[in-house]
Amino acid sequence: MNWTEVSIVANHEVSPIITNVLEDYGSNGVVIEDSEDLTRDFEDKYGEIYALNAEDYPTHGVRIKAYFNEIKYTKDFQVKLVQTLRDIEGLDLGLFRFDEQTIKEQDWENEWKHYFHPFRASEKFTIVPSWETYQREDDSELCIELDPGMAFGTGDHPTTSMCLKAIEAYVKSSDSVIDVGTGSGILSIAAHLLGVKRIKALDVDEMAVRVAKENFQKNNCENAIEAVPGNLLKEETEKFDVVIANILAHIIEEMIDDAYNTLNESGYFITSGIIEEKYEAIVEHMKHSGFEIVSIKHDNSWVCIVGQKVSD
């Protein structure tokens, strides 16, 4: 199967909204190239400064690349996507640019290797690409070996790293966890590394479930995590101590009541994938459903919310 790489250049202010739109349209993977990165110093794990190649970045604004399979990406689909993007409030039409190219599946998978290197995603978790070697800095460092494949979630996106930090803060080894929209499986693997024994990973996309299972094998936890296709929590009958959902805001809104009903008393709902403009509505809905909001974190126009079930 071939893939279409969509490349969008836009002003910084609307880049989170564009990312949200692309995911809403079913993009399998997102890469962000920020022109401002060229003015920053980046360090590897040994403290050495390394330079970025300016040719890989736009001269102004942000370039966002998204990937769609050839079955989904029809002419009508493209027309609707471009119009949705052009209608975004605050979009600088003078800077806006939309390009596309066809990429073979093997080349698509190799594209990730240009952008994905080992990095510390939180206090405890380090994300290590499956094609690179890495030596832990100390015994407390927990390494997640990852191959994104066709699924979104390498850990470098603010929503994923905020979820990892929330997992560190609120998940105990004695908890049971359900990861809704597991993608690459990164959050389920993190829960496993903290000692959680009961983990269930759901995704409506069967390809994502396959990629997650492959990553579970790489991290020697394929027998510890139940990975199955699932449509949110609509058919879930089992109770869990923690519900994790790093998905789109409007989908989160649909599942808030189900998340509450799926949780055991005093359980936590950890959720992200929410842009700044939508988080207050999510918070109000969670409160209305019975959640006590225990944490709201912001990172680069994205928000992670943690709610606790306080009463039936």
Image (cartoon, grey):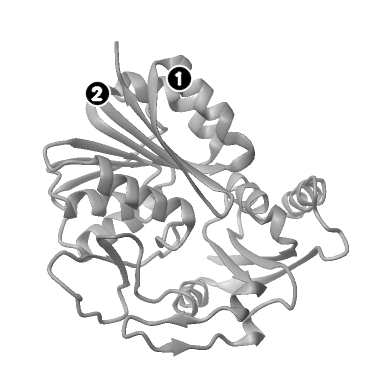
The C terminus is located in which quarter? top left
The residue that mark 2 highlights is 266
| Occupied quadrant, residue 173 | top left
Q: Nearer the viewer, residue 122 or 190?
A: 122
Is residue 234 visible to the viewer in this orientation of the structure? no
Query: From this viewpoint, is residue 177 visible?
Result: yes
- Look at the numbered disc 1 and give the secondary structure of its residue: helix
**Residue plotted at (60% across, 44% down):** 24
Q: Residue 120 in the image: x percent, y percent?
A: 33, 68
Q: Amino acid at mark 2?
A: Ser
Residue 119's spot in the image, x, y percent?
A: 36, 71
In the picture of the structure, the residue carrying the numbered disc 1 is 287
Q: Is residue 107 left or right of residue 72?
A: left
Q: Position of residue 235 (x, y in %)?
A: 34, 24
Percent of width and height locating residue 183: 40, 51
How far, Cα to Cα, is label 2 from label 1?
14 Å
Q: Nearer the viewer, residue 186 or 159?
A: 159
Residue furthest right in the image:
94
Residue 102, relative to residue 52: is it above or below?
A: above
Looking at the image, residue 116 sits to the left or right of residue 278; the answer is: left
